Image (cartoon, grey):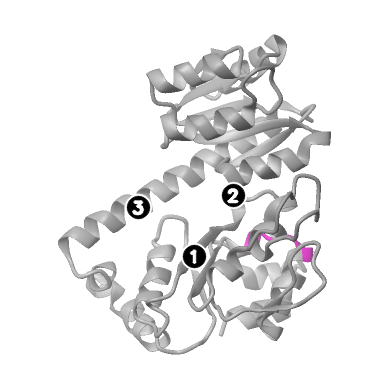
Amino acid sequence: MGKSVLIVDDDAPMRSFLSAVLREEGHRVVEAGNGTEGLAKLSAGEFDLVVTDLRMPGLSGLDLLREGKRASPVSNWIIVTAYGSIGSAVEAMKAGASDYLTKPFGSPEELRHVVRRVLREADKEARISLLSEELGSRFPPVETIFLGERMEPVHGLVREVAPTPATVLITGASGTGKELVARAIHRLSPRRNAPFVAVHLSSLPEALLESELFGHERGAFTGASAARKGRFELAGGGTLFLDEIGEIAPAVQVKLLRVLQEREIERVGGALPIPVDVRVLAATNRDLRAQVASGRFREDLFYRLNV
C-alpha cells in the first residue's frame, strides 16, 4: 500500500526526479520548493515519509528536520546530501533522520532501496509498539508473549536463560516477535531495572554503524562537534538488543567480537578503551550457519553469540 511522501528540494529537476521515482512505487507524493514551504505542508497534514535536501536557502534541511519533528512526530525522514556534507548527514541522523542518500545517485534503484528499507523498519516498529501496548493493557507483560501450547517451549527457554548472563541468539522469520522475546528475557533478568536498548542494524547505513554502536569522540569526523556515547554505553548495566545481526559488515563483526571478548569498547576517533557492562541479545532472520559456511559471517562471532 502506498504511503504519503513529502519531497522538499529547491532544485526543481531533482525534485521532479525524486517525485517520479516514488510515484512509480505507488506512493502519494506532495512537493515543496523550499524548507519554509515544506514546514507549512507538514503542519497542515500528516506524512509517512519526508525526503528533503540538506542544503537549501533559508530554512535548511537540518532545520526543517528539527522543526518538522515537532510538527509531525510520526514522519520518517531521509536526508539527501552531497558527498562533501556527510558530517551534516551524521548530525541529521542524530536529530532523528532515519537514513540519508548521497547525490548524485548511482541509479533510481538506490533511492527505491533506501525508501523501502526506511518504510519497512517504520512499519515493523509500529507493529511491535502496537502489539506491546495491546498485550500490556490486557495481560501480565511477559506471559502474554507465550500464549498457546506451541509457545510453551519458547517460554521455558526464556525463563531458563533470563537469569543468566549468557549472550542469546534469537532466530526466526520477520514478524515472529523476536524483539518481544528479547524484551521478555530482559524483564525476567537481574538487569530488568536497567536500560533495554534496541538497535535495528539493517536500518543503519554502514558509514554510521560504528559511531551508533560504539560512540565517537569530538572531531572524529566532519560534523562530530561533540563526543557522543554509543548504544553500548547507553545500555550500561542493562541489555543491548542487536536486531538483524546477519546484516553487519565484516569490519564491524571484528569490532563486535572484540567487545564480547574484552568487555570494552573504543569510540570512533578515540584511543582509550572504555569498559562496558552490557548483556547482548541478538536476532536474525537469516541462516547464520550457512553464512558462516560461505564466509559471510565470522565463525568465532557466531559461537560467541549462539551461547
N-terminal of the pair, mark 2 or mark 3, is 3
Amino acid type indicated by mark 3? Ser
Query: Mark 1 or mark 3, which is nearer the start of the sequence?
Result: 3
Number of the label disc, if any, that sits on residue 197: 1
Using the numbered discs, state the Cα–Cα distance from disc 3 to disc 1 in whole angstroms.
14 Å
Residue 97 image point, x, y percent: 58, 40
Q: Nearer the viewer, residue 176 or 41?
A: 41
Q: For mark 2, give the secondary structure.
A: helix
Residue that numbered label 2 is attached to: 203
The magenta segment is: 246-251
Residue shown at the point (47%, 35%) measured from the top left: 69
- Label 2 to label 3: alpha-carbon separation: 17 Å
The label nearer to you, 1 versus 2, is 1
* Res. 129 mark: 3
Q: CA distance from mark 1 to mark 2?
A: 15 Å
Q: Is 265 included in the stretch rendered in magenta?
A: no
Residue 287 x, y percent position in the rendering: 59, 67
Which circle marks residue 226 in the picture?
A: none
Q: Is residue 248 magenta?
A: yes
Name which residue type carries label 1.
Val
- Please tell me in which quadrant of the rendered image residue 263 appears: bottom right
